Image: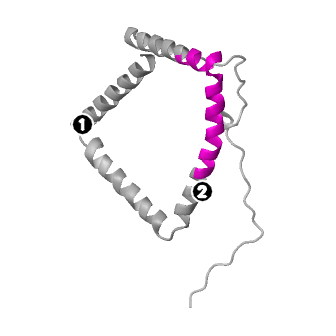
Amino acid sequence: MTQQPPIDTKASPVAEPAPEHLAATPTPLPSEPLTVSPTPEPASQELMHRMQSKLQQLWQMLSGDRNRPMWLIVSIITIPAVIIINNVLALVHSIPLLPSLLELVGIGYSVWFCSRYLLLAETRRQLRQQVNDWRLRFWASTID
């Protein structure tokens, strides 16, 4: 049996003060928020202008007096729809093994999607093109 050296209980570690260059000094906050304004390219300015005008048209269409009954109908339908969806999800969650099975399906789909579209540069370009085509069709349909 080996003997361990005795522990000195009288000595207590004393923290040394931090060097002056590391001492925490409060930095004053700027009186005004900092803003960064990059100069956008002309193509992005045109896109931003088109998106802004489309959003303004959409807002005017939805906020007009003639559409007030639509807002009332949508809000009345939304509350029961949320309650029904919540009950359906609770029912699905209460069935044994079904949540785990759906989770596995989701993981499998995610792995397939990543291997199909995200691994190679060519497939990433195809996906980007498909998303851009869909986005252009969507924005074109909201104005027409």
The residue at which mark 2 appears reads as 87
Q: Amino acid at mark 1?
A: Ala
Nearer the observer, 136 or 111: 136
Secondary structure under tag 2 reads: helix
Q: Is 11 on the left or on the right of 91, as rendered?
A: right
For the N terminus, the image quarter is: bottom right
Residues packed near mark 2 inside 10 Å, few (<14), some (14 to 19) or many (20 plus): few
Q: Amino acid at mark 2?
A: Asn
Nearer the observer, 141 or 48: 141
Corner quadrant of residue 33: top right
* Residue displayed at 65% across by 26% down: 69
Q: Which residues are magenta?
A: 58-84
Residues packed near mark 1 inside 10 Å, few (<14), some (14 to 19) or many (20 plus): few
Q: Is 33 on the left or on the right of 123, as rendered?
A: right
The residue at which mark 1 appears reads as 121
Q: Is residue 26 placed above or below 88 in the rendered structure?
A: above
Task: Give the percent coordinates (x, y) of residue 125.
Answer: 26, 32
Task: Give the percent coordinates (x, y) of residue 56.
Answer: 55, 14
Our reading of the magenta stretch's main secondary structure is helix
